[in-house]
């Protein structure tokens, strides 16, 4: 399965969804939240307050968490038991030369293929 994800500073965009690039971290599962992801012992929810502009989106895990939300939204109602997933993500051309090495290291540290 191929997923294209555009990690915009204002919105995350996929073929099937667009949502604000905003998340909130919680130590316990929020009881009224509809979309919740548990990652690394913490709960995450989407918010309408976008993350302030960030040039290096590999600096922390927030845009990785937003990618998980993007995948879950595109798979909603059609969850396979197992799937090989390819992510079509990348760097903006104006930042490619300064961020490509860090992006490659981040991809490798997550056990992903940088191809």
Image (cartoon, rainbow, N blue to C red):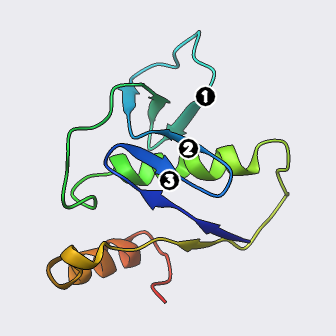
Which residue is under mark 3? Answer: 67
Front one among 108 and 12? 12
Marks 1 and 2: in contact by CB < 8 Å? no
Q: Residue at x 67, y 44 (%)?
A: 73
How far separated are the C-alphas under marks 2 and 3? 12 Å
What is the crowding at mark 3: few (fewer than 14 residues within 10 Å), some, or many (at least 20)? many
* Local SS, label 1: loop
* Local SS, label 2: strand
Which residue is under mark 1? Answer: 35
Mark sitting earlier along the chain (3/1): 1
- Whether residue 112 is situated above or below residue 75 in the rendered picture: below
Q: Residue at x 20, y 46 (%)?
A: 53
* Local SS, label 3: helix
Q: Residue at x 41, y 56 (%)?
A: 7
Report the disc number at residue 18.
2
The percent position of residue 31, horizontal first and vertical second, equals 58, 10
Work out which residue is located at the far top of the displayed protein and give it.
32
**The N terminus appears in which quarter of the rendering?**
bottom right
How far separated are the C-alphas under marks 3 and 1? 13 Å
- Whether residue 12 is situated above or below residue 83 in the rendered picture: above
How far separated are the C-alphas under marks 2 and 1? 14 Å
The percent position of residue 99, horizontal first and vertical second, equals 20, 76
């Amino acid at each position: 399965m191929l997923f294209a994800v555009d990690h915009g500073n204002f919105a995350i965009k996929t073929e099937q969804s667009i949502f604000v690039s905003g998340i909130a971290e919680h130590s316990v599962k929020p009881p009224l939240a509809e979309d919740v992801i548990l990652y690394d012992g913490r709960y995450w929810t989407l918010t309408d307050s976008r993350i302030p502009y960030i040039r290096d989106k590999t600096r922390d895990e927030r845009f990785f968490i937003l990618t998980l939300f993007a995948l879950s939204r595109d798979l909603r109602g059609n969850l396979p038991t197992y799937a090989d997933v390819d992510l079509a993500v990348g760097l903006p051309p104006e930042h490619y030369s300064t961020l490509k090495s860090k992006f490659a290291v981040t991809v490798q540290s997550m056990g992903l293929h940088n191809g």
